[in-house]
Amino acid sequence: MEREQIIKDIQTGSTALGIEFGSTRIKAVLVGSDNTPIASGAHDWENQYENHIWTYSLDAIWKGLQDCYQKMSEDVKSQYGIPVETIGAVGFSAMMHGYMAFDKNGELLVPFRTWRNTITEEASKKLTEVFQYNIPQRWSIAHLYQAILNKEEHVSSIAYFTTLAGYVHWKLTGHQELGVGEASGMFPIDIETGDFDKRMIAQFNELVAPENLPWNLEDIIPKVLTAGEGAGTLTEEGAKLLDVSGTLKAGIPVCPPEGDAGTGMVATKSVAQRTGNVSAGTSVFAMAVLEKNLEKVHPEIDMVTTPDGSLVAMVHCNNCTSDLNAWVSLFKEFAESFGVEADMAKLFSVLYNKALEGDADCGGLLAYNYFSGEHITGFEEGRPLFVRTPDSKFNLANFMRVHLFTSLGALKTGLDILLKEEGVKLDELMGHGGLFKTKGVGQKVMAAAVNTPVSVMETAGEGGAWGIALLASYMKNKAEGETLSQYLEEKVFSGQKSTTVKPDAKDVEGFDEFIRRYSTGLPIERAAVDFLK
């Protein structure tokens, strides 16, 4: 977009702003009338471990938001020479799940409990059993029920509980609402109504009835909205909270707040049924947009929704590229010992491509990349391992290949439940994250793991802040009857370049052979956890 048009967009409010609270960074992205980023700002922050709880303080939330917004405004001023006085639409997003409970005066009752806390096992198991629906430990309802089980004093004073995204949205607009994707990480959604499941709400109320609490669940949870619906406007107080300089005007429309899973789907154009996305870096998760509900309850699979309410199956694994990166760093150290200056980007490229020369099944080699526990395979701790038999084909190509394969080993274990047991159909997966930086290699391995074409777009690195900006833009600019999927296809991604790698039959067969070895060898990993302290 031309500079003159960008300036006009900023002056006339033909823009959209997305702000996302990630676990280590708060990021703001401002887009122009063509939905491409024109300015950004970021604020780094870290969670705190206090009284055995992973948390962020309210002060850190607001200082981070204000600093992030200010840096975006400074970026606009620096690039285009004008202040940001108005914006077409705004959206807020954050890491999903967790627990923020407030009393009738709007005061936080206990410190914010983030998704990272694994303190709700008893509640998670009981709710899964009662609902016959998988309730992971990080879900908001698991935190609430665990607080009830713990007989925590604050529970009787709860007037409202929500997520981080819901909290920020509430304070800036006065509206106690959530987008359906974010809401689906609080409590199960009824796909037919697009609202919290009323049958399960009744089951929860019955479950906690002996506690004689002064509220029912439906009294204290947010209202659920779908992408495209209005979710209030920035109040005078909200505008000043966001922009401490006082330049930003009130009355700007705000879209429903969403979670990072939903904004990731939007940023990778993965909201239509039979599509999905894979984010592969330090950890890895895959999301598949379903055509219908699953036949069984699977503890390995989380059920959430897209921002426009389609059912999504999510497989999340704690470990992906950490062990692979450690081996590449070892090879760098080896090269430098010979006086060779090793550029990491080139080293990754060379070693990743070397893996493509290996045997389809990695030549009988076996590795586990478990730096930490992995719930899908039943490990509470991890021990990175490399194992081979005397007659394995041990060479560099197979060594790199097995470490690429094992980075997706736990993920494939979960995805096989979806694709093979449940018969889920996928036409395409969109890949983003560090595993896909070396052109073609990560895609080829991923395509082999899931037997599905894998595409990577040039814009995949823009991330969730761009995703929530697009949701704000969709709310303001959609045509009558235009779906989110259509809007993304026609108004956002129509000119975007992507590369697609289709699965190779020999690679698919080789990955299946590797995963059989991987599953059979899990007792080796168990022994390492038990005896290597």
Image (cartoon, rainbow, N blue to C red):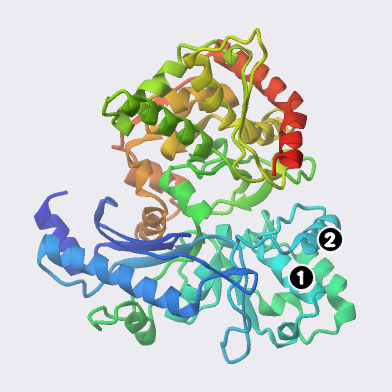
User: Is 330 left or right of 493, judged from the image as shown?
Assistant: right
User: Is 151 left or right of 419, judged from the image as shown?
Assistant: right
Picture disc at residue 126: 2
First in residue order: circle 2 vs circle 1: 2
Q: Place residue 187 in its image quadrant.
A: bottom right
Q: Place residue 329 in its image quadrant.
A: top left
Q: Residues within 10 Å of mark 1 (few under 14, many from 20)?
A: many
The residue shown at (38%, 31%) is 333
Q: Position of residue 295 (x, y in %)?
A: 78, 40
Q: Nearer the viewer, residue 441 or 103?
A: 441
Element under label 1?
A: helix
Amino acid marked by disc 2: Lys
Q: Position of residue 217 (x, y in %)?
A: 74, 75
The residue shown at (79%, 64%) is 123
Q: Nearer the viewer, residue 273 or 455?
A: 455
Q: Residues within 10 Å of mark 2 (few under 14, many from 20)?
A: some
Q: Residue furthest right?
A: 210
Q: Is residue 452 visible?
A: no
| Vertical position of residue 458 compared to residue 87: above or below | above
Amino acid marked by disc 1: Tyr
Q: Position of residue 119 (x, y in %)?
A: 71, 64
Q: Nearer the viewer, residue 200 or 14?
A: 200
